Image: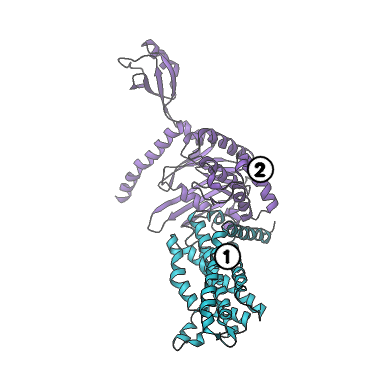
Chain colours: A cyan, B purple
Amino acid sequence: MSQSSANLIALKTVVHREIMRILRIWTQTLIPPAITMTLYFVIFGTLIGSRIGSISGHFTYMQFIVPGLVMMAIITNSYGNITSSFFGAKFGRYVEEMLVSPMPAWVMLTGYVLGATVRGLAVGVIVLGIALFFTSLDIQHPLITAGSVVLGAVIFSLAGFINAVFAKKFDDIALVPTFILTPLTYLGGVFYSINMLGEPWRTLSKANPILYMVNAFRYGVLGISDVNVAWSFVVMIGFVVLLGGFSLWVLKRGIGLRS
Amino acid sequence: MSPVPALVVDNLRKTYEGGVEALKGVSFRVEQGDFFALLGPNGAGKSTLIGILSSLVNASGGDAHIFGVSVRKQRNAAMRLIGLVPQELNFNQFEKPFDICVNEAGFYGIPRAVAIERAEKYLATMSLSDKAHEQARRLSGGMKRRLMIARAMMNEPKLLILDEPTAGVDIEIRRSMWQFIDGINAAGTTVILTTHYLEEAEQLCRNIAIIDHGTIVENTSMRSLLAKLDIETFVLDIAAPVATLPAIDGCTLRRRDERRLEVTLPRTQNINALFAALSAHGITVISMRNKTNRLEELFVRVVEHGRDDAPRATAEAGA
């Protein structure tokens, strides 16, 4: 059997195992984000949003926040999936099953990232489905919509992987979401347009990578964005290359995994 | 041309962060088809050595070749040749044994249809067919150990490394595991075994290396090692208590309790002479057994001898 066929089988195995894990614990992986986002839609979209009026032209506040909330669900679930799954494998030592196998590092990384991306996208579809109970959406640019959600999920899967590799205890995988991911998400234009901000906050917001993901996705769905969409894709692809390269380097060196 | 050795360990060194030197230039070789014992006290460096062979530990120096393939330079190719049964349980307790085995094969690039066939075969061999679709955490300790052996066989390795595979397993299951591993070896797989049950090593292995403090202190055939044992100690159960112990030429007799004596004698001495002498003193022996396993006695001697030498060598070097 050729090396590429063997690698493909190994990749399928890692992805299959990750998807089985997501389905096995679906009450922890798929239901909670759906409940949380429903609450956001009810409270921010319906109750408060109805008093805000239109935003960025002719969109209701509910329509404005849906892309942001879908993207928020995608990135937090992609991140959460890979950190808990990979750190769990490290903690339970069954990551060794893969480390002692002939599977190349890139196959292992791709498998975990694809698994986390699947979870992020599955949650994204669920949240979008729930959103349609509250408002109507007409996707303006399907390719940009698809590209932005996939890139957003991949970026945060890679970031979660790095977090899991360096984590030594369960607290370590909670630190980044609590102190970095959540603030950046809330300040990333999910609930507001950065054009509503004064300086220097508007300029400072542009240093937040999540702003580009949210706005690329919002452009795909609604056709509006606070930032240049082409530039958003450059930023996202840049992050994929940077985080992917670092993850691979860490994995090849065995940092945090091999003594 | 002689076949390439199953394993060549060449001047392997490992110094952990913090300066602990776990391996100080270990070298030995294991021939194809061998059943090789790697013994040593706790902390001797066995697990580090196995960790390097299975690429879980990065070596600080030296190399190891598995069937001629360098572990350090051609890791992926080398890993394809080995199967590892580690000391600690390292599978997902929430997965089912069947899935654990099939996934393991997948990591080695084995097609799913073949993986399913092998999983059924090796789980059956390990008497785990009826537990194949239960969560692994529900298995007993012995079953979990057997599951790790079944998993290690999924890629049908040329070199199987067993790191204390029978720890905590009852004697009946241990014997059935010996039979299985012996069968694997007879079918051509080279086996390296580490164990604290020296009876296990003596019974199964043909060659042996003893490691202590990161250094190989003995590396020979089991037969040659056992031949070094020049004295043996037996425990004798006697019919009635004796007031005073008789002096018997060439033997050292000690009292363990009222009805048990301990006798040490050279292996060259005729044991019939001992019984005759005891009988002449009115002592009736009901039964006898070895005080310790022969390999155990040698193991203790080799390790203790190595440790006695160590300070002397240091002192000489310092002088």
In the rendered image of this protein, does residue B188 appear above or below residue A16? above
| Marking on residue A161 | none
Q: Amino acid at mark 1?
A: Ala
Residue in front for this viewpoint, B126 or B40: B126
Residue in front for this viewpoint, A122 or B59: A122
Image spot of residue B79 (x, y percent) = 58, 53
- From the viewer's perspective, tell me whether residue B106 is left or right of residue A253: right
Residue in front for this viewpoint, A177 or A124: A124
Q: Which residue is mark 1?
A: A116
Residue B84 visible in rendering: yes
Image spot of residue A193 (x, y percent) = 52, 84
Q: Which residue is mark 2?
A: B121
Tell me which corner region of the image, top left, top right, bottom left or bottom right, holds residue B189.
top right
Report the chain holding disc 1.
A
Residue in front for this viewpoint, A59 or A3: A59
Q: Amino acid at mark 2?
A: Lys
Report the chain holding disc 2.
B
Q: Contact, CB < 8 Å: mark 2 with mark 1?
A: no
Residue B67 visible in rendering: no
Q: Secondary structure at mark 1?
A: helix
Q: Secondary structure at mark 2?
A: helix
In the rendered image of this protein, does residue B56 appear above or below residue B174? below
- Give the number of marks: 2
In the rendered image of this protein, does residue B8 appear above or below residue B228? below
Q: Are marks 2 and 1 on the same chain?
A: no
Label 1: few (<14), some or many (≥20) within 10 Å? many
Label 2: few (<14), some or many (≥20) within 10 Å? some
Image spot of residue B262 (x, y percent) = 37, 23
Tell me which corner region of the image, top left, top right, bottom left or bottom right, holds residue A135.
bottom right
Image spot of residue A241 (x, y percent) = 56, 74
